[in-house]
Image (cartoon, grey):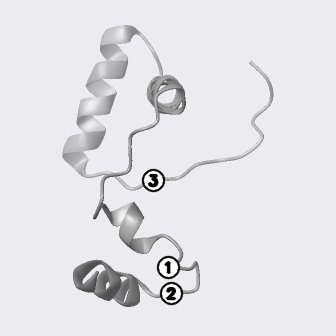
Amino acid sequence: MTATADRLDLRLSVEDKNRLRRAAELKGMAVAAFVREAALHEAETTIARPPKARRGSLAARLRGRATARMSTDEIMRLTRGA
């Protein structure tokens, strides 16, 4: 494996973290390696077969309207009113 280029942090509930820890133990892997492997597998699957955007989906409603500078409240108003 190559040197780590970047770091990804995420928040998990205690229950979710315990599920990941248990699954990693069952596979004989470190939690980070287990999560990385599972996430990369899911990414490859999604890239190979992108989900079709449903009319009225959140992505469709926000496309061209939401920006990185918007607050969570503004984005929530967009999703409710679209």
Label 2 Cα neighbours within 10 Å, binned few <14 / some 14-19 / many ≥20: few
Left or right of 61: which side holds 63? right
Residue at image coords 34%, 84%: 78
State how far apart marks 1 and 2 are (Cα): 7 Å
Element assignment for label 3: loop
Label tally: 3
At which x and y percent is residue 52? 38, 43
Question: From the viewer's perspective, is the residue at label 3 or at label 1 nearer?
Answer: 1
Q: Do the numbered discs 1 and 2 sit on residues whose CB atoms are within 8 Å?
A: yes
Element assignment for label 2: loop
Q: Quadrant of the N terminus?
A: top right
At which x and y percent is residue 31? 44, 28
Left or right of 76: which side holds 40? right
Q: Which mark is residue 70?
A: 2
Q: Earlier in the sequence, mark 3 or mark 1?
A: 3
State how far apart marks 3 and 1 are (Cα): 23 Å
Residue at image coords 39%, 90%: 74
Label 3 Cα neighbours within 10 Å, binned few <14 / some 14-19 / many ≥20: few
Left or right of 24: which side holds 36? right
Element assignment for label 1: loop
Residue on which disc 3 sits:
10
Q: Give the amino acid type for the residue marked by disc 2 in the picture.
A: Met
Q: Which mark is residue 66?
A: 1
